[in-house]
């Protein structure tokens, strides 16, 4: 499936308010998130960094009107030049989770990423988008491949040897018109 063929899903990306933090922290602890996102206290620090930094940003994902997940994106080199994996300066790294278990598998994750990619590109298209995902996280790899990310190399992270570094070029969104072909 080409990236632009990802099924449309009704999501909104909302600014994160202080009162959302407990919900997000609960998601970091959820059994279907914890193995892939790692230490919740580190994740809480990243949320705080992304909320105040000019080099990162984050949103609450609302799916069909209710909060279901969290997404963050960061200038990889500004976050950690030592962990830029040879990717070009300005690469934007994305992390996503669907925290509500009953909202998994409905396309919300890739749609949230698609909207973040469009948002970032509207401002200034980066050379690449990147993400890291554990090799055994098959649903995540599937979701990211549907969005046009491809596996580049296996990377060691937090003592785990098998993390796929995946990247995607900032392909412009298809131009939709009402004109008949
Ligand atoms: C990775 C993630 C964001 C994908 O979002 P999503 O909205 O579930 O993505 P999709 O609906 O496109 O589903 C992707 C794949 O998940 C699998 N899947 C389907 N239903 C599922 C369910 N109920 N539970 C788990 N996986 C499911 C399928 O393989 C699906 O691919 P398919 O549509 O070709 O069948 C989401 O699974 C998630 O948040 N997982 C927990 C945290 C995590 O792993 N984050 C990524 C870390 S790198």
Image: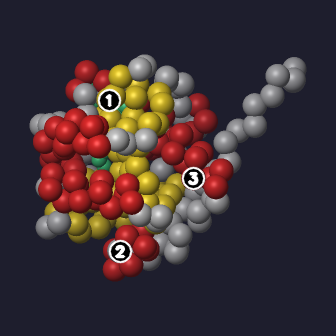
- Mark 2 CB in 8 Å range of ligand 1? no
Which label was assigned to residue 175? none
Name the side, left or right, on which 34 lies relative to 114. left
Q: Judge by depth and name the residue closer to the eye, 17 or 141.
A: 17
Choose top left, top right, bottom left or bottom right for residue 14: top left
Residue at 75%, 31% (x, y): give it: 176
Residue 152, percent from left and from top: 42, 62
Say whether disc 3 or disc 1 marks the residue closer to the N-terminus: 1
Residue 135, percent from left and from top: 26, 52
Is label 1 in a helix, a strand or a loop? strand
Residue 67, percent from left and from top: 33, 28
Say whether disc 3 or disc 2 marks the residue closer to the N-terminus: 2
Residue at 82%, 22% (x, y): give it: 178
Inspect this view and state whether residue 166 appears: no
- Label 1 crowd bin: few (<14), some (14–19), many (20+), radius 10 Å: many
Q: Which residue is mark 2?
A: 80
Q: CA distance from mark 3 to mark 2?
A: 19 Å
Name the side, left or right, on which 120 lies relative to 104. right
Q: CA distance from mark 3 to mark 1?
A: 22 Å
Which label was assigned to residue 120? 3
């Amino acid at each position: 499936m080409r990236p632009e063929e990802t099924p449309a899903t009704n999501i909104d990306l909302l600014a994160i308010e202080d009162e959302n933090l407990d919900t997000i922290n609960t998601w970091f602890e959820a059994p279907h998130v914890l193995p892939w996102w790692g230490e919740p206290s580190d994740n809480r620090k990243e949320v705080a960094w992304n909320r105040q930094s000019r080099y990162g940003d984050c949103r609450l994902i609302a799916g069909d009107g209710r909060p279901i997940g969290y997404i963050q994106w960061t200038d990889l080199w500004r976050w950690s030049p030592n962990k830029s994996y040879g990717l070009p300066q300005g690469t934007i790294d994305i992390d996503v989770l669907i925290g509500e278990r009953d909202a998994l598998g409905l396309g919300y994750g890739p749609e949230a990423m698609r909207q973040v990619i469009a948002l970032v590109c509207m401002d200034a298209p980066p050379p690449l988008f990147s993400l890291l995902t554990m090799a055994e996280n098959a649903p995540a790899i599937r979701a990211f491949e549907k969005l046009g990310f491809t596996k580049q190399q296996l990377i060691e992270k937090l003592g785990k040897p098998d993390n796929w570094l995946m990247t995607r070029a900032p392909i412009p969104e298809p131009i939709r018109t009402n004109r008949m072909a």
